[in-house]
Image: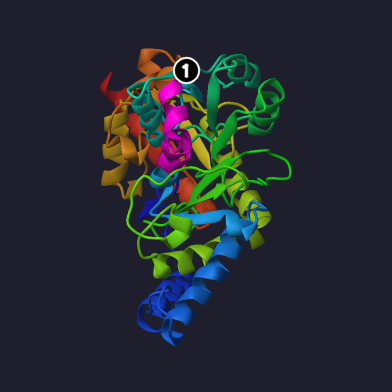
Amino acid sequence: MIYLDNSATTQVDEDVARAAFEAMTVNYGNPSSPYMLGRDALTLLTQARHQVAQVIGAPTRRLFFTSGGTEANNLAVRGSLLADRDQARKGGRVVTTAIEHSSVLASCRSLEEEGFEAVFVSPRGGRIRAEDVIAAVDERTRLVSVMAVNNETGERLPVEEIARGVKEKNPSVLVHCDCVQGYGKIPFTLNCIPADLVTMTAHKIHGPKGCGAIYVREGVKPGPICFGGSQESALRPGTENVPGIAAFGLAAGNALKDIRKNWLHVEMLNRYLREELEQQPEVVINSPEGAVPYVLNLSVLPFTTEQMVHEMRMRGIYLSGSSACEKGAKSHVIRAMGIEASRADSAIRIGLGKKNTLQEMKVLIETLKEMIRREKSYE
């Protein structure tokens, strides 16, 4: 098996899995309980909060755990705008991009039903331009939500330029950055990017699924989207997922420690793929220039996306056509980029990770060449 869908999820590291196992079998207390077993669980929670916050240079007290990136994005978008009922009744404008994750797009569309105006900025020349996002901000704008790295093409959005430009134009606007695909992979610190809200998740950095987090700047007060307890400062009530959070903390620490080593390794794999693919006239690279090496989007024109994914799967090579959250639907990101229909219908995503090898890339290239040769022989 060759796993090339690391943008959808990653294999959990063994030490990370052991951390979760130990939290389930040894330190299994409820962190809200007043006795030692509960205190031990609380210690794990506190340590993990520090580890996760450290990756983006956030104060520990301003980081809150969620069930994943989707919930965190809903908290950031809906929670921050609907917390104050009087302000919510006044509505306002929400600015985002047309290539965001579905959890952000759907949250913004839901706000339209609450009386807000949602603006979806499209790519220009295949990329999101900072000036286009900033230009969409006016005096009625309440929130700007922009991802750090696109999960389908690897595009690295100009979040620093956007955040600073938005704050200069309208200081009262909240800036949210969905950092799910960039967290622990690219340098991203609040010292450089004046974001009010940042969201992240564990399962993109070899941690477990079902565990995410949101950073909330001091003074920003989003409201909860579920109710019932005082955990996580009542922003995300309910007993904390201590095993998942402990594992998230360790995965975050590992990612931060190895961020440069992992980048250089994946960059080498990506460079090899690009050099080989550029020699194939049937292959077109869809990832824009400057994309992070962890994601490589391409089209193989003799095939549809479904054919490519199926053929590769039959050969034990696992990749995808779009975000796993789309459940096989056509990529809204590729459509928004304005890519011609034949190329869009053939788009596939290669999600690279630290566990992939050069030998796997060679097998992928040879498999692709064989498929193209076979297809040509039928013509």
Element assignment for label 1: strand
Percent x, y of residue 189: 68, 47
Q: Residue at x 69, y 20 (%)?
A: 169
Task: Determine whether, in the image, residue 182 is placed left or right of residue 364.
Answer: right
Judging depth in this view, the residue of 355 and 106 nearest the camera is: 106
Residue 151 visible, this angle: no
Amino acid type at circle 1 is: Val
What is the span of residues highlighted in magenta in the rendered image? 73-91
What residue sits right under mark 1 in the picture? Answer: 119
Q: Position of residue 5 (x, y in %)?
A: 40, 46
Q: Height in image: 94 above or below 179?
A: above
> Residue 69 or 253: which is nearer the viewer?
69
The kind of secondary structure the magenta stretch mainly shows is helix
- Residue at the extreme front of the image, as rendered: 86
| Residue found at x 45% / y 53% | 212
Is 335 drawn above or below residue 147 in the view shown?
above
**Residue 75 inside the magenta-drawn segment:** yes
Residue 250's x, y, as percent? 54, 67
Residue 343 image-quadrant placement: top left
Q: Is residue 237 visible?
A: yes
Q: 47 or 201, which lies in front?
A: 47
Q: Badge 1, how many Cα within 10 Å: few under 14, some, many 20+?
A: many
Question: Looking at the rendering, in which quadrant would you find the C terminus?
Answer: top left
The reply, left or right, for residue 185 in relation to residue 68 is right
Q: Position of residue 47 (x, y in %)?
A: 57, 70
